[in-house]
Image: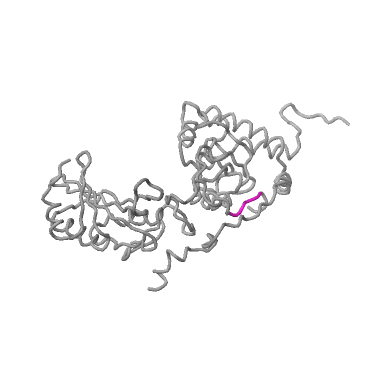
């Protein structure tokens, strides 16, 4: 039962159309803390021109973003901020972990530096390099676009699938008192309470 | 950098138990902890050391020949005469408290918070005695030599956000 279509009409699945719109209008949220942030800025500059991929609208307001680019090392004090921004972003959303530090902690295996943001937020694309060049970030965005086109669904089932696959982690018991799970360190806040 | 010997002589006359040494033009003054505030007050008020460059601390744990655990260092400058002095005092556990000098130099505020944050030395009378670099719930003092470089698991204990939790 062939249907005669005019030449300017294309038939597709709604799913594919939605994914196509999403991948070509990524709005990145730059979470730039270190040297990778400079490469991220260079990527947005005219020489490399990220606008070619529909991803030039860097917004510092998480409500308007759907792609978080974590560029640079993240420390313990910054992680709650990162998580809050991630939670404020609208679904569907993606995350690129840019550079060695964001992906693994890099050379900073110290008490304060998070050893990979993927331990605490979901990450879709890892970018190697220290720091990666703008070309690499652009390649990462192209690959992420492929992934969005390939995996995206209108109902968001792929995210539910990923959530089910992610293992649950238990809290680690810290040795000896005082524990850090108190909201405020009582040693520090003793003087304030007494006043 | 110039050093006015008069400042040190006057300080020595006024306060007992002070020793000095010099290395490459830098004069170091070691003050007993009980006279620390009086010494700094004298240097600030009468010798016009108007600029507190830095407050920092050294942990001498396992240091060769060291007799005290912590060395608390005040770096002072007189911006008119360009005099510089390093005033230091030694502290031992459990008595790790010194008076705050925020009443003399406003700039001591954040420096004292940093020394508290990293070494756990308390500054009595500080207007805002909180951690400054580390999260408030952090329990240890990381620049002490007996604290492991990779921590004791502090950086692992955050809630994990999954795809369905956002």
Count of numbered badges drawn on the protein: 0
Q: Which of B14 and A79 is in front in this view?
A: B14
Query: From where the camera sits, is residue A182 visible?
Result: yes
**A39 over B59 or under it: above or below:** above
The structure residue drawn at horizontal position 20% and vertical position 58%, both measured from the top left corner, is B17
| Quadrant in which residue B11 is drawn | bottom left
Q: Determine the residue located farthest toward the right in the rendered image.
A: A1
Location of the N terminus of chain B by quadrant is top left
Q: Taking A173 as reference, is A34 left or right? A: left
Query: From where the camera sits, is residue A69 visible?
Result: no
Q: Nearer the viewer, residue A156 or B17?
A: B17
Q: Could you tell me residue B12's position as x and y percent?
A: 15, 56
Q: Could you tell me residue A131's position as x and y percent?
A: 50, 32
The structure residue drawn at horizontal position 15% and vertical position 42%, both measured from the top left corner, is B2
Q: Determine the residue located farthest toward the front in the rendered image.
A: B65
**A132 over B128 or under it: above or below:** above
Q: Determine the residue located farthest toward the left in the rendered image.
A: B6
Q: Taking A32 as reference, is B75 left or right? A: left
Q: Taking A106 as reference, is B95 left or right? A: left
The structure residue drawn at horizontal position 39% and vertical position 69%, both measured from the top left corner, is A191
Q: Could you tell me residue B69's position as x and y percent?
A: 37, 54
Q: Indicate yes or no whether the magenta region holds residue A119.
A: no
Q: Magenta segment, principal secondary structure?
A: loop
Q: What stretch is highlighted in magenta?
A: B158-162
Q: Taking A193 as reference, is A170 left or right? A: right
Q: Could you tell me residue B151's position as x and y percent?
A: 52, 50
What's the colour scheme? one colour
């Amino acid at each position: 039962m062939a249907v005669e279509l005019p030449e300017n009409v294309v038939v597709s699945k709604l799913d594919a159309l939605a994914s196509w719109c999403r991948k070509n209008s990524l709005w990145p949220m730059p979470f730039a803390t270190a040297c990778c942030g400079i490469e991220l800025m260079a990527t947005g500059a005219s020489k490399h021109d990220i606008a070619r991929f529909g991803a030039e609208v860097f917004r510092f307001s998480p409500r308007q973003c759907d792609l978080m680019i974590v560029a640079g090392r993240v420390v313990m004090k910054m992680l709650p901020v990162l998580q809050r921004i991630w939670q404020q972003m609208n679904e569907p959303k993606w995350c690129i972990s840019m550079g060695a530090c964001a992906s693994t902690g890099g050379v900073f295996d110290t008490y304060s530096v998070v050893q990979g943001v993927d331990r605490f937020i979901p990450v879709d694309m890892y970018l190697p390099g220290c720091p990666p060049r703008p070309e690499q970030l652009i390649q990462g965005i192209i690959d992420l676009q492929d992934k969005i086109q390939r995996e995206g669904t209108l109902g968001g089932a792929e995210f539910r699938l990923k959530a089910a696959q992610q293992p649950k982690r238990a809290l680690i018991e810290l040795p000896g008192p005082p524990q850090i799970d108190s909201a405020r360190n009582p040693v520090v806040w003793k003087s304030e309470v007494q006043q | 950098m110039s050093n006015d010997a008069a400042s040190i002589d006057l300080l020595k006359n006024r306060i007992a138990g002070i020793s000095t040494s010099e290395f490459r033009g830098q004069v170091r003054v070691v003050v007993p902890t009980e006279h620390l505030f009086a010494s700094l007050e004298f240097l600030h008020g009468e010798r016009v050391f108007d600029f507190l460059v830095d407050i920092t601390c050294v942990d001498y744990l396992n240091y060769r020949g060291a007799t005290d655990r912590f060395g608390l260092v005040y770096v002072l400058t007189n911006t008119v005469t360009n005099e510089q002095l390093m005033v230091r005092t030694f502290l031992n556990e459990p008595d790790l408290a010194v008076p705050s000098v925020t009443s003399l130099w406003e700039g001591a505020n954040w420096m004292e918070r940093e020394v508290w944050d990293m070494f756990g030395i308390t500054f009595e009378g500080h207007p805002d005695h909180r951690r400054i670099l580390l999260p408030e719930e952090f329990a240890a003092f990381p620049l002490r030599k007996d604290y492991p470089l990779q921590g004791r698991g502090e950086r692992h204990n955050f809630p994990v956000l999954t795809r369905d939790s956002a």
